[in-house]
Image (cartoon, rainbow, N blue to C red):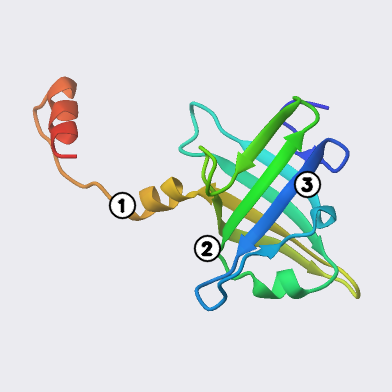
Amino acid sequence: MNISDPLQTDSFEIESAFIHPHEGQKEKVAIDSGAIKQFEYSEGLMQKYVTVTLQIEDSTSSLFESIFGMEEIEIVVFDKFSDKRLEFTRESANGSLFIYEVHSKDVSDTVKTFVLELCREDALNNAVTRIGKKYTSISAQELVKDVIEKE
């Protein structure tokens, strides 16, 4: 197994997974750990933010039909490959994750398979915050100073 490959079911253990539905429903809903077939965690110096990809097989249809995007996900995963625990909850330093894309939907007679792309809340905030100002004849040092002072 390559370190950059997504973790398959024998390489990780879901300790807990919950979805917080939209405003209309107040209680979080448990996601069956057996339904999560693939887990991929990604971060790095060249990336803008942390991402998590989950492949889910839903045999109950309740999860599949309640996901529209932007739902909050809390998940705790033990990575057997690196012997590390990854915690994305409201109480953890990482914070919880949010669904920003649902794709690869496949529906068969008994199972609905789909992929959830997740990111932290700071990535969503950054996506909607635009910085636009034209600078001419200014040094990089002055540019950084100007931006930081106005933050």
Where is the N terminus found, in terms of image quarters?
top right
Give SS at disc 2: loop
Residue type highlighted by circle 2: Met
* Residue 62 higher or lower than 113, as above or below: below
Residue named by callout 1: 129
Q: Residue at x 48, y 39 (%)?
A: 49
Residue named by callout 3: 38
Q: Is residue 79 left or right of residue 102?
A: right
Residue type highlighted by circle 1: Thr
Q: Residue at x 53, y 45 (%)?
A: 91
Residue 43 falls in which quadrant of the image?
Answer: top right
Query: Is tag 2's residue or tag 3's residue first in the polypeptide sequence?
Result: 3
Residue 108: percent from left, percent from top: 87, 72
Residue 101: percent from left, percent from top: 58, 59
Query: Is tag 1's residue or tag 2's residue first in the polypeptide sequence?
Result: 2
Q: Is residue 96 left or right of residue 54?
A: left
- Please tell me whether mark 1 or mark 2 is closer to you in this view: 2
Marks 1,2: beta carbons within 8 A: no
Residue 72 falls in which quadrant of the image?
Answer: bottom right
Residue type highlighted by circle 3: Gln
What whole-number distance in Å separates the C-alpha atoms at marks 2 and 3?
A: 20 Å
Q: Nearer the viewer, residue 47 or 78?
A: 78
Residue named by callout 2: 70
Q: Is residue 13 left or right of residue 70?
A: right
* Residue 8 higher or lower than 125, as above or below: above
Query: Is tag 3's residue or tag 1's residue first in the polypeptide sequence?
Result: 3
Q: Residue furthest left?
A: 137
